[in-house]
Image (cartoon, rainbow, N blue to C red):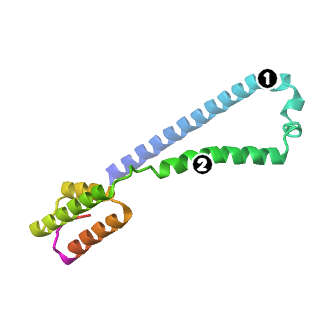
Amino acid sequence: MKWLISLSVAQTALLAALGLKVVAIDMRTGEIAEAAQAQTAPIETAADPSALSWDNARAASVTAEDVRQILREEIAALDTPVRAAAAPARPQQTAEEIKTASTAVDHDINYFRSRGAINEREMATLQAKIAKLPLAERRAALSSLTIAMNKGEIDGWM
């Protein structure tokens, strides 16, 4: 019991010391703020008071329509590269190249069916091959792969 009382007294003393430190820091920050305000006060009074007014902040030569036009131009300039980057141009493939690539993907899917499994690296390679196919062939290959995985013919993760 004596230990608890002595620890309680020590804790109270430490909290009081901490409170005094916080008050001392607060007083120092107040002094620093007053000194900074005293240094900036001559600068503010030396400046032209009419330049600091919101009434004089607008330029009379710029109308709302001018601002709208500027904004339209800036948005159009920002939007154009985004559209160009969003749809990268694919090199045109010949019908024979498409058929060869599609056959290779079908062959790979049948190989993994016969093996019964596919690891992550092989799946990434297969997906990269599928991604190079045109839309119709890509859909067919992904459909074939998904059906095989759903039936349990190929064990792996997409």
**Which residues lie in the magenta part?**
151-156
Residue plotted at (28% across, 67% down)? 141
Q: Where in the figure is residue 142, as x and y percent of width and height?
A: 29, 67
**Camera-side residue of 14 and 48:** 48
Q: Where in the figure is residue 137, as x and y percent of width and height?
A: 32, 65
132 over 52 or under it: above or below: below
Residue plotted at (14% across, 69% down)? 113
- Mark 1: amino acid: Ile
- Which residue, as the protein is rendered here, is positioned at the far bottom? 151
Q: Where in the figure is residue 110, as x and y percent of width and height?
A: 16, 67
Which of discs 2 and 1 lies nearer the camera? The answer is 2
* Residue 136 left/right relative to 49: left
Residue plotted at (24% across, 58% down)? 100
CA gap between label 2 and label 1 equals 43 Å
75 over 35 or under it: above or below: below
Residue 43's tag is: 1
**Quadrant the C terminus occupies:** bottom left
| Residue under pointer 2 | 79
Majority secondary structure of magenta residues = loop
